[in-house]
Image (cartoon, helix red, strand yellow):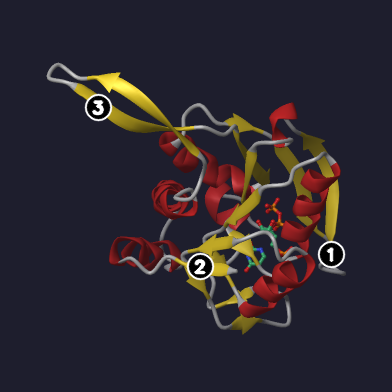
Amino acid sequence: MAVMIDHPCVQHKLAIIRDVDTGHKRFRELATEITKFICYEALKNIKTREVSVQTPVAEAICHKIDTDLVVVPILRAGVGMLEGILELVPTARVGFVGLYRDEETKLPVTYYERFPTQIKGGTCIIIDPMLATGGSTVAAIEKLKEHGAANIVVVCIVTCPEGVALVEDQHPDVPIYAAAIDDLLNDNKYIVPGLGDAGDRLFGTSH
Ligand code: PRP
Ligand code: URA
């Protein structure tokens, strides 16, 4: 299942982050802002428990989050979304998976992993701005499942039909939330129109 967040506030920010003239400082700020909005929607079905709170006036029946949340950025571009989700759920734990896409084969290569034990039984949110072929996201999902994760959500900024289809085919239990589902991948497996190389644009590097 892929959910596109088409709220005007998100789409307005998406227009700016896509712009080739947006520099890395503003790009980072927008990645944080957009992530917060997408995650707000992505987390709407997480488990809560009823609690009683005494207000200055009376008892109120309220609801608190009742699941361990583990955010897993895919290094390196996923780090650009971390601040946004932690603003929303500051008590979340953070795991990391290091993956890069081989420039020739376009296949993901894993170089790092470190997860909190709470991925077992908790809710894991994989963050990566770009879900292109879907290879990196599928590899991250597989790593988490190998370590016992059973409840996984993917949050990205831009994806495309090919990437969504791969994740849906390999992991139909994992929903994807995105600000945009773009048209296609180009010959270099970049999303079109996309926003370019997210890692480079976030961190001010270039190939
Ligand atoms: C980018 C992006 C994803 C991956 C998407 O990372 O951040 O992780 O490519 O492509 P896929 O869906 O085809 O696998 P990249 O490999 O450029 O590494 P970086 O984050 O270190 O820049
Ligand atoms: N990685 C990116 O950073 N951008 C794309 O469009 C595809 C992969």
Residue 171, percent across and down?
75, 63
Q: Amino acid at mark 2?
A: Val
Where 126 falls versus 169 (above or below)?
above
Residue for point 84% across, 43% down:
111
Residue 45, percent across and down?
48, 50
Mark 1 to mark 3 CA distance (whole Å)? 52 Å
Mark 2 / mark 3, whichever is N-terminal: 2
Mark 2 to mark 3 CA distance (whole Å)? 33 Å
Residue for point 16% across, 21% down:
58
Mark 1 / mark 2, whichever is N-terminal: 2
The residue at which mark 1 appears reads as: 107
Mark 1 / mark 3, whichever is N-terminal: 3
Closer to the camera: disc 1 or disc 2?
2
Q: Viewer-proximal residue, 172 or 12?
A: 172
Residue for point 46% across, 47% down:
28
Element under disc 1: loop
| Cβ of mark 1 under 8 A from ligand 1 | yes
The residue at which mark 3 appears reads as: 60
